[in-house]
Image (cartoon, coloured by chain):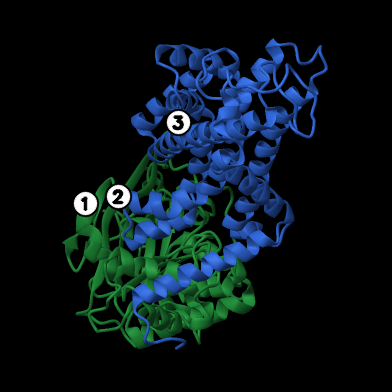
């Protein structure tokens, strides 16, 4: 299934999120552009601290951007909580930790019905009552038959079941787009495949667009149509998954891929150090202090070493033709 | 589908009834909780049936029929006090005051404490800070002195005593609730609820409060104990309702007539044991309730 060019589309344009901390202003997001269409699975990958979760939270409207905009079908997100209700019905989120994301005092039924009740949809427009809608959502999330689970509490469920209940809770509102933050990182390897297969089948059956936030490139390879790589609050490379992961342009993506055991033909490049402190984003290319291409002289040979250290890169724009792009002086020499 | 014809209302009722039933069967497995509940029921019955169990004439000093500090006998099961009144009659009538002041003061204290703790913990910011400072300020004021000052401003009555105790004993609860709220506030299920479209009121009512309630219950048991003890103290200092007999005022009388030195244990022990019994019963019930209300504690005893 390919993306629907006319279907709903969620976009982040130049989104920045800044937090004031003791150490100064932290730029958790520093001008990130991203687009997710219905019927398309987009993977957002990056190290811890790269801002992928913040971008996901901004896209679902629980984190307000300091700068930039989130747009649904070209319309900016309203700022008033009441006006956000229609947006919430169309864009839902599945959180990282299924054990913590379900209220331990609520039964499965209550957790799944919560969204319906909040939006006054307990009597569905299509004549389905609340119980029927909850049962349908649980079935759609692969929990069949749903009735025996209604009165269970989260601690009585397995990790995979909890994740499916979370997904069901989001599906109950019949969203068009789903943002999944590390949907399988807390699950056993045996269950990961099932949950990922569920996401793929939801795209097939419901035409759902899914943004999967992950640190696992293998996961991106397995499920995503497009992959965006984030570094220090910005998207540094984006394009069709096959191109990004088989022919990475950005030295950062190359380094990430080189240490994936299944990838052959790339000499392992272990990046030194952590992602820099977001209160002190390096000048020039934000990746240059850790860049292997700058360290081994490739940048020097290409004549861009000075630019790497001194010239900031523009925000990687959303490509209308879906082309593979990278924000790197080596790829697009300055001037 | 188990019951596709049920309306949502009937379904909700069915599920609520089921959870009550499950709660009760869970409670029944706590033997100590059942014992506490039994003791409480007995005390409440005694308090409610006081006019039937003991003639109120027995409270009148002028109509006293016994001798001064008589030891327990067939006629006076728990002996008599210094005015010749039956200690048992005083004890039965005293349970009314002690229980009522204890419960009323606890309701007031819990109400203020929970509200202040929830709001200051959940909202933070300037409002939260101000409420937090006010809480700390009231906390450092000596509670007894404050209660004495407040009590002396009004004509003593049960309501005034309850209000005074309630108004001076909430800061501990507020701090506890605030701490719990701060921790619950960061849980992922609040974020999930927010994404689903929940506002502050929904989050507080459906997510924060239910997860704080076990703390409230656990704390209630202590507050009832403190309230009953405070009532005793205020009565002892002559700030209680002088027209009503309470366990506190009985203890005070016992001390003032020298029940200890004369060996009149029957005047001293019964009210003391009653206070201990009620406090213990509340604690046992509170512990059992806490585990019923917190599904995670189930099966872990």
Regarding residue A62, the answer to whether it shows in the image is yes
Q: Provide the residue designation for mark 1.
A: A79
Dot 2 and dot 1 residues touching (CB under 8 Å): yes
Regarding residue A166, the answer to whether it shows in the image is no
Q: Is residue A321 above or below residue B234?
A: below
Residues tagged by mark 2 and mark 1 found on one chain of the structure: yes
Which type of secondary structure does the marked residue at label 2 adopt? Answer: loop
* Chain under numbered label 3: A
* Chain under numbered label 1: A
Which type of secondary structure does the marked residue at label 1 adopt? Answer: loop
Measuring from the top left, give residue B120's x and y in whole percent: 41, 34
Q: Earlier in the sequence, mark 3 or mark 1?
A: 3
Chain that is green in the image:
A
Q: Provide the residue designation for mark 3.
A: A22
Q: Nearer the viewer, residue A198 or B152?
A: B152
Q: Earlier in the sequence, mark 3 or mark 2?
A: 3
What colour has chain B?
A: blue
Looking at the image, which residue sits at the far left?
A: A75
Q: Which residue is drawn at the image coordinates 38% and 79% (left, top)? A: A131
Which type of secondary structure does the marked residue at label 3 adopt? Answer: loop
Q: Provide the residue designation for mark 2.
A: A64
Q: Nearer the viewer, residue B127 or B146?
A: B146
Q: Which residue is drawn at the image coordinates 39% and 32% (left, top)? A: B128
Q: Earlier in the sequence, mark 2 or mark 1?
A: 2
């Amino acid at each position: 299934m390919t993306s629907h060019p006319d279907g709903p589309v969620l976009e982040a344009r130049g989104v920045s999120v800044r937090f004031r901390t003791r150490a100064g202003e932290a730029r958790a997001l520093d001008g990130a552009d991203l687009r997710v269409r219905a019927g398309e699975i987009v993977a957002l990958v990056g190290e811890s601290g790269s801002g992928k979760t913040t971008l996901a939270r901004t896209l679902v409207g629980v984190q307000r951007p300091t700068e930039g905009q989130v747009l649904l079908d070209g319309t900016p997100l309203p700022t008033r909580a009441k006006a956000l209700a229609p947006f919430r019905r169309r864009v839902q989120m599945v959180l990282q930790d299924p054990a913590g994301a379900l209220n331990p005092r609520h039964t499965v039924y209550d957790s799944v019905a919560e969204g319906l009740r909040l939006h006054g949809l307990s009597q569905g427009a299509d004549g389905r009552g609340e119980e029927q809608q909850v049962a349908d959502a649980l079935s759609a999330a692969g929990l069949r038959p749903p009735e025996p689970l209604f009165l269970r509490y989260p601690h009585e469920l397995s990790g995979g079941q909890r994740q499916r209940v979370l997904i069901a809770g989001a599906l109950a509102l019949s969203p068009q787009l789903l943002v999944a933050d590390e949907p399988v990182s807390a699950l056993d390897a045996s269950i990961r495949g099932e949950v990922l297969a569920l996401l793929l089948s939801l795209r097939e059956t419901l035409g759902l667009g899914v943004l999967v936030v992950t640190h696992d490139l293998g996961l991106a390879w397995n499920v995503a149509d497009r992959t965006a790589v984030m570094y220090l609050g910005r998207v540094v490379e984006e394009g069709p998954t096959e191109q990004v992961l088989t022919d990475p342009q950005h030295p950062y993506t190359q380094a990430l891929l080189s240490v994936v055991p299944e990838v052959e033909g790339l000499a392992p490049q272990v990046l030194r150090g952590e992602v820099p402190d977001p209160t002190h984003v390096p000048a020039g290319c934000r990746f240059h202090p850790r860049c292997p291409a700058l360290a081994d002289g490739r940048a020097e040979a290409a004549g861009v070493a000075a630019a790497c250290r001194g010239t900031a890169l523009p925000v990687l724009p959303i490509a209308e033709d879906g082309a593979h792009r990278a924000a790197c002086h080596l790829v697009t020499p300055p001037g | 589908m188990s019951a596709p014809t049920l309306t949502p209302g009937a379904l909700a009722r069915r599920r609520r009834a089921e959870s009550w039933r499950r709660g009760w069967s869970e409670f029944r497995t706590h033997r100590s909780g059942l014992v506490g509940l039994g003791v409480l029921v007995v005390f409440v019955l005694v308090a409610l049936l006081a006019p039937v169990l003991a003639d109120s004439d027995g409270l009148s000093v002028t109509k006293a029929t016994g001798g001064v500090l008589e030891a327990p006998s067939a006629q006076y099961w728990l002996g008599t006090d210094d005015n010749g009144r039956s200690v048992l009659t005083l004890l039965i009538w005293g349970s009314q005051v002690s229980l009522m002041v204890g419960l009323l003061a606890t309701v007031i204290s819990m109400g203020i404490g929970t509200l202040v703790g929830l709001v200051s913990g959940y909202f933070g910011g300037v409002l939260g800070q101000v409420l937090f400072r006010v809480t700390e300020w009231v906390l450092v004021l000596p509670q007894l002195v404050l209660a004495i000052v407040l009590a002396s401003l009004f004509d003593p009555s049960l309501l005034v005593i309850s209000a005074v105790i309630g108004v001076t004993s909430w800061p501990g609860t507020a701090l506890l609730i605030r701490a719990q709220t701060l921790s619950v506030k960061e849980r992922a299920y609040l974020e999930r609820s927010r994404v689903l479209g929940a506002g502050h009121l929904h989050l507080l009512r459906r997510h924060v409060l239910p997860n704080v309630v076990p703390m409230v219950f656990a704390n209630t048991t202590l507050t009832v104990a403190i309230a009953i003890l405070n009532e005793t103290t205020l009565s002892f200092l002559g700030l209680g309702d002088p027209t009503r007999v309470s366990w506190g005022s009985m203890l005070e009388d016992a001390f003032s007539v020298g029940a200890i030195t004369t060996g009149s244990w029957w005047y001293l022990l019964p009210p003391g044991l009653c206070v201990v019994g009620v406090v213990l019963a509340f604690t046992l019930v509170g512990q059992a309730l806490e585990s019923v209300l917190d599904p995670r504690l189930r099966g872990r005893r």
